Amino acid sequence: MAKRSIFICQSCGALSNRWQGKCEACEAWNSIVEEGATSGIGAQAAGLAKKGKIFALEGLDGEDRPAPRIICGIAELDRVTGGGFVAGSVLLIGGEPGIGKSTLLIQASAALARKGERVVYVSGEEAVAQVRMRAQRLGLSNANVELAAETNVEDIVATLSKGPKPALIVIDSIQTMWSSMQDSTPGTVTQVRGSAQALIRFAKTTGACVILVGHVTKDGQIAGPRVVEHMVDAVLSFEGEGGHHFRILRAMKNRFGPTDEIGVFEMTGLGLAEVSNPSAMFLAGREAQSAGTAVLAGMEGTRPVLVEIQALVAPSSLGTPRRAVVGWDPARLSMVIAVLEAHAGLKLGQHDIYLNVAGGLRISEPAADLAAAAALISSLTGAVLPAQNVYFGEIGLSGAVRPVVHAALRRKEAAKLGFSHAVGPGGGDKKENFALELQSCSHIGALVGDIAARAAAAKRKPGEPPATARASNGARAHLDY
Ligand code: TYD
Ligand code: MG
């Protein structure tokens, strides 16, 4: 039979029958490699795989013990992993250079080693002396972490197989690893994938937890093959804004836990410190007296987080006004603007609009709609929002403010930080007694009316009788307290 070849994208694993410069599936360039159709994925595709042996199938109701967890003791890290590292699992942690991945992992390694576990830290980027120096500076040198500066995975696996099974192995970074089984140069897609495979196999067979550090490209993707992300059990991303000291660890994928948890750290002179009360940190330095800012009572996973949303609405001199967003979804902003125009009569078409989530946090939940709208209206009208208010609620296309999850938790957190009023969708937990009063707002028009009334009151001279609360466009409504 004629030898058949199959072409496989080394980035996404897509198959094709001919070589192409660009993968049609993931649009990666120069990622397609010819593989013989007598083994691997190629053989399956060509139907040439040998006949397999028969195995038994099982039901869903079998008895299995939950996978044992290794708790490292750094609470913010344990939270993101879903309650500790799972034995036999592989975790990929990505982040920009200098964000603090190596620092976090040496701290986690030391914490675990102090609990009496065997921890091995393999650095492919730094010499042993450099890792040791950093550990000394962080006051970790008395922890029993075994160090190595190695890049060959076969050597690493052979070394790790000797002696007692390690609980945790850190590989810093996967891009520096190479396998003698592959004949391409280190750092290439084939090498990264091959090395990851060898390490994953080691984790699965021995029950050790392996953490791989991955570099990210400019647009935030973990460099190298996307398939590594598919191969591992969890992908964490370590992020931070330039100029800010705090760092956020976020789960992007987790086979053993939720993906909406975040861990908050602060980079100090003595390494990464845990931030157990992120709301206080995000609100530090808030200027409650300026227009265009609203505090969102948000949620990150199971944890309420208060954060300031800042908006700047200014008349534009451009034909197409600028819309710029930091920390929120631009499509979501466009939608809120459209709803404000259609259902509250605001005229924003000739205004540049900038929206910023203070502190560099990235928000993805729809509950931020109402806070963003409040900040926008406040900036447009020049009315300062009450300093004791927090906002949450999803805005529908009809202008209705819809309920969001965990309203009670959001209000509790706001009350804890000294806020006295929450503006949000009504209903839900009426019976619960909070230190915080809920001003129910069921339509966006009510919010516009209320803020416009504040703007009018601020402009009024003392002694002048109040005019009817009225937005410049005629929206006339009050919050239905
Ligand atoms: P590092 O962990 O080497 O980053 P990565 O492995 O993600 O590339 O962190 C490097 C940065 O962290 C460096 O710019 C200095 C800063 N840093 C501190 O501010 N304090 C410290 O105690 C340490 C160890 C690092
Ligand atoms: Mg590093």
Image (cartoon, grey):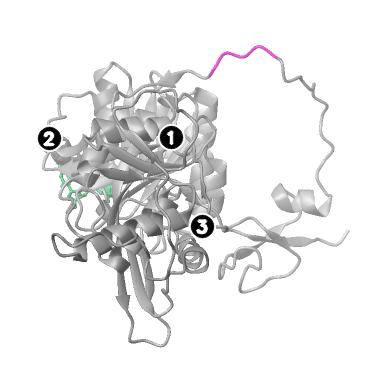
Q: Is residue 426 above or below residue 177?
A: above
Q: Check the image and report above or below for 469 versus 423.
A: below
Name the residue rendered at 20%, 66% in the picture: 459
Q: Residue at x 19, y 57 (%)?
A: 243
- Residue 69's image quarter? top left
Depth order, front residue of 68/156: 68
Which quadrant is the N terminus positioned in? bottom right
Q: Are marks 1 and 3 in contact (CB under 8 Å)?
A: no
Earlier sequence position, callout 1 versus callout 2: 2
| Disc 1 target residue | 407
Q: Which mark, residue 189?
A: 3
Q: Nearer the viewer, residue 439 or 167?
A: 439
Disc 2 is placed on an element classified as helix
> How dense is the environment of label 1, judged by Cα within 10 Å: few (below 14), some, or many (20 and up)?
many
Q: Which residue is mark 2?
A: 136
Mark 2, residues whose alpha carbon is within 10 Å: few (<14), some, or many (≥20)? few
Residue closest to the far right:
1
